[in-house]
């Protein structure tokens, strides 16, 4: 397990316990190099995560859908496939580590937006326009203003 702080592969387990519902083992690890502590989860891989869509329907969590949405938002933007893949990986990890069996599509969309904000602002606004269902130009302007505000702070 790679230390999230220094990247070292050497760690020791300092605590290990089952999650409340017994579906996962939570381990506290201490990095042998920088001595910082972090948590890892061990869980059964086949446990499916369901995504609750806006209309209330559920479907299996599928990272390829996130990737498709990202590629679309990043079209003709200076964002590499590597960057997209690592963002998809981060989101997948967050969803799996949450140990929830259901997650709303809105929450996933928010995670995507959070990551995109760092990568490319145009792609972010594009994605936001779909995810937040902008119905008029004012909503889009508001989102852009928020971005600009954050920058000048
Ligand atoms: Zn470390």
Image (tube, rainbow, N blue to C red):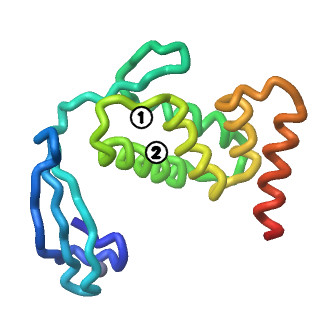
In the picture, the quarter occupied by the N terminus is: bottom left
Which numbered disc covers residue 88? 2
**Residue 86 place in picture, x, y as percent:** 46, 53
- Estimate how packed mark 1 is, as few (under 14), some (14 to 19) or many (20 or more) residues with alpha carbons within 10 Å: some
Query: What residue is at 70 percent from the left and 37 percent from the top?
Result: 128
Query: What residue is at 27 percent from the left and 42 percent from the top?
Result: 99
Residue 7, quarter of the rendered image: bottom left
Q: Compared with residue 37, is residue 142 higher up or lower down, i.e. above or below?
A: above
State how far apart marks 1 and 2 are (Cα): 7 Å
Q: Indicate yes or no: mark 2 CB to ligand 1 under 8 Å.
A: no
Query: What residue is at 41 percent from the left and 32 percent from the top?
Result: 103
Which numbered disc covers residue 63? 1
From the viewer's perspective, is 108 left or right of 80? left
Indicate which disc, 1 or 2, sits on the residue closer to the N terminus.
1
Q: Do the residues labelled 1 and 2 touch (CB within 8 Å)?
A: yes
From the viewer's perspective, is 93 left or right of 23? right
Which numbered disc covers residue 11? none
- Estimate how packed mark 2 is, as few (under 14), some (14 to 19) or many (20 or more) residues with alpha carbons within 10 Å: many
Q: Which image quadrant shows ligand 1?
A: bottom left
From the viewer's perspective, is 100 left or right of 148? left
**Residue 113 place in picture, x, y as percent:** 61, 45
């Amino acid at each position: 397990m790679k230390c999230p702080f220094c990247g070292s592969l050497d760690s020791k387990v300092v605590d290990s316990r089952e999650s409340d519902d017994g579906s996962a083992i939570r381990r506290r690890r201490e990095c042998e190099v920088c001595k910082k502590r972090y948590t890892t989860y061990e869980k059964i891989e086949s446990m499916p995560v369901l995504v609750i869509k806006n209309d209330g329907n559920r479907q299996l969590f599928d990272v390829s859908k996130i990737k498709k949405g990202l590629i679309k938002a990043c079209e003709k933007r200076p964002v590499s496939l590597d960057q997209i893949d690592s963002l998809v990986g981060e989101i997948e990890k967050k969803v799996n580590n949450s140990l929830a069996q259901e997650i709303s599509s809105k929450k996933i969309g928010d995670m995507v937006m959070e990551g995109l904000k760092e990568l490319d602002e145009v792609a972010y606004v594009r994605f936001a326009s779909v995810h937040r269902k902008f119905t008029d130009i004012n909503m889009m302007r508001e989102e852009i203003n928020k971005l600009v505000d954050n920058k000048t702070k």
